Image (cartoon, grey):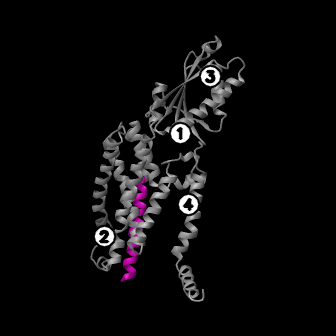
Amino acid sequence: MKLIKPVIRKEFFHILRDPRSLTIVFVMPVFMIFIYGYSISFDLNRIDVAVVDGSHSPLSQELLDRFASTPTFAFRQIPGPGDAMAGAEAMLRAGLVQEILVIPPDFATLAASGRTAPLGLVIDGSDSNVANLVYQYSERVVQQFLLDKAGFEDLIKIRTQMFFNPEARSSYFFVPGLVAILLLMVSALLTSISIARERETGSLDLLFISPLRSSEIILGKTLPYMLVSFIGGLTILLFARFWFGIPFRGSLTVLLLFSLLYLLCGLSFGILISTIAPDQRIAMIATLLITMLPSIMLSGFIFPLDSLPLALRLIAHVIPATYFLRIIRGVVLKGAPLSAFWFEGAMMLLFSIVITVVAVAHFTRQRRNAR
């Protein structure tokens, strides 16, 4: 021990002088257990429901009141006049509701005459786990309603239809989500090492003294990676379609347009990290931490956003994958149109602009300090 005590003391000093190692040892595990502890939840705190009531009877209203009194269920108004069922299906396709409650016109008449009255549940089956929870929660409300109504124990029968994924295949939900995660990770990784590599090899000073403006340098470094990322993203989409047999029910043009916006988010993230990171290794580690962990846990990739606490739901709204996941699942699985995702597209464009402006400003400050 006398011989190795100086070595032990020396290593302790090195550890204390290395804040990055201490961060990995103490901060990262606490951060990860905080994220996992709150995000890993299979409970649903909110189920948006569209109601098509053809009965308009006291019995149907009483059943709807029972759903409305349950904190989990929230009724959404079907927009505009016209066919209520068609409007409800459009809402389901756009992801505005997870369930349509269909009450037939003869609902009260059949129940009053002692015959079985059907109650229709049309559920968004794109996420098989959430679809099963929606059915279980709805069935629980109906069963409790029947128990409270004397003589109605067996007079209502639930008929369920799963839209978009009738076979409840989990790959239909997870593979498009994986495409979104991989697009962000790959695009950010490509650009995150670009300026960091110049700094590491010593050629960054040549860029600093070049006659090009900082925005032109950033743009020149981004455009090649945009093309490479777009081709790689198209390859990932084609592989998911033909290898896993994921159905494609929407417009390819719409998906490619939003994919381009999403890639801009990833590339701008990478450029910002590249202007800050001292070398390629740090840039790659930071990119993986910033893109993968939040995108997997807080974007709705695995767990529904409604199951997250309010603080984490707020964080989820500044994660680009949150918006692109809605788009890719909506277009691929539901065939949703361009108009259903104008907000998501606007948010991704805003993220790209803001992050790129910050990256250019930081790079300009570095050039000024270098001179």
Q: Residue at x 40, y 56 (%)?
A: 184
Whole-Å distance between the Cαs marked 4 and 1?
Answer: 24 Å
Among the two numbered marks 1 and 2 on one chain, the one whose residue lies closer to the N terminus: 1
Give the dominant element type of the magenta stretch: helix, strand or loop: helix
* Disc 3 element: helix
Q: Does residue 24 lie above or below 327 as drawn?
A: below
Q: Residue at x 53, y 45 (%)?
A: 304
Q: Residue at x 65, y 27 (%)?
A: 143
* Disc 2 element: helix
Residue 58: image x %, image y %?
Answer: 65, 20
* Disc 4 element: helix
Residue 72: image x %, image y %?
Answer: 62, 38
The residue that label 4 is drawn on is 32
Among the two numbered marks 4 and 3 on one chain, the one whose residue lies closer to the N terminus: 4
Whole-Å distance between the Cαs marked 4 and 3?
Answer: 47 Å
Callout 1 environment at 10 Å: few (<14), some (14 to 19), or many (20+)?
A: many
Instruction: Name which residue type carries label 4.
Output: Met
Residue 251 or 202: which is nearer the viewer?
202
Residue 173: image x %, image y %?
Answer: 44, 42
How many marks do you count on the picture? 4
The reply to whether dot 4 and dot 1 touch (C-beta < 8 Å) is: no
The residue that label 1 is drawn on is 130
Q: Residue at x 36, y 68 (%)?
A: 193
Frontmost of labels 3 and 1 is 1
